[in-house]
Image (spheres, helix red, strand yellow):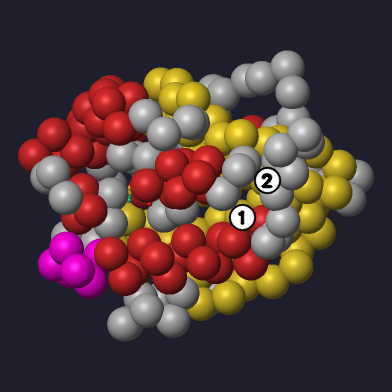
Amino acid sequence: MTLRLSDAETSKFWNDRHQRLTDLRSGGDVSYDEATNSMFYLRRLSMLMDRIGLQNNRVAPLYLLDAGCGKGYFSRELAKLGHEVDGIDRSEAALAQCRELGGGPRYYQSGLSEWRTSWLYDVVLTVDVLFHIMDDAEWERSVRNLASLVRLGGKLIIGDWGQDGDHLFGNYQICRGRNTYVPLLEACGMRFESWESYRFRRSPIGFYTFTRIG
Ligand SMILES: C[S@@+](CC[C@H](N)C(=O)[O-])C[C@H]1O[C@@H](n2cnc3c(N)ncnc32)[C@H](O)[C@@H]1O
């Protein structure tokens, strides 16, 4: 039986990896070189743009939460498009780099299950983070908390695989499928819209999109 990393071990794993790797592999795919990771990030950015919408408004910008922002690639790119972005992550090493690079987003050290605000977001996105939360109870608290931060009519975008069931890959990745996400998020007042594959190399991952309807 494969042992899963505990919550504390997961945080240490990511902080060490963000310290050790200076390129996109740090939050991307370690098996890809830098050029391939650049493509991988661009592909997912354009999928996020499709879901967030191809509009911006200086007077009434969209408020986005990048939950598990890592070194802030998506936060910075989405801020460049005119959106107001908050990025949260547990890794102090990743956040130090985010702050050094600047570019508009506000960054906070927080777990996905712990982030509280006095405002709601138009879009909450979490790219390739939830499948690294190995503890099922912490994963559920995280999903419920992210859903609670989405305004009525707003969207929750989650990177995970599109199979029906769940699957453990090694000790630091557990993909949860439709049969896990959809009933849980429907009970949180969200409507399932779609799952679309990243269509990148052999990645089984894609984006779930949910809309708050109640
Ligand atoms: C694969 S990286 C993805 C980072 C970023 N979304 C990207 O695509 O570049 C996973 C990130 O999730 C963060 N993370 C893992 N578990 C977390 C948790 N429970 N709360 C907040 N961040 C977490 C890690 O620190 C790491 O930065």
Which segment did they paint magenta?
31-37
SS of the residue at dot 2?
strand
Q: Residues within 10 Å of mark 2 (few under 14, many from 20)?
A: many
Residue 112 in view = no
The extreme left residue here reads 20
Q: Residues within 10 Å of mark 1 (few under 14, many from 20)?
A: many
Q: Is residue 205 left or right of residue 39?
A: right
Task: Assign the C terminus to one quadrant of the image.
Answer: top right
Q: Is residue 140 left or right of residue 202?
A: right
Instruction: Look at mark 1 in the image and give the residue it sits on.
Output: 157
Please tell me whether residue 75 is drawn above or below residue 88 in the rendered image: below
Q: CA distance from mark 2 to mark 1?
A: 8 Å
Closest to the observer: 71 or 181? 71
**Of the two numbered discs 2 and 1 in the rendering, the one whose residue sits closer to the viewer:** 2
* Image location (x, y in percent) of residue 100: 27, 26
Closest to the observer: 31 or 78? 78
Please tell me whether residue 155 is drawn above or below residue 92 in the rendered image: below
Instruction: Look at mark 2 in the image and give the residue it sits on.
Output: 123
Q: Is residue 53 left or right of residue 168?
A: right
Residue located 56% across and 24% down the image: 115
User: Quick check: is 45 in the magenta stretch?
Assistant: no
Residue located 54% across and 23% down the image: 114
User: Quick check: is 36 in the magenta stretch?
Assistant: yes
Task: Assign the N terminus to one quadrant of the image.
Answer: bottom left
* Image location (x, y in percent) of residue 26: 21, 48
Q: Amino acid at mark 1?
A: Ile
CB atoms of marks 2 and 1 within 8 Å: yes
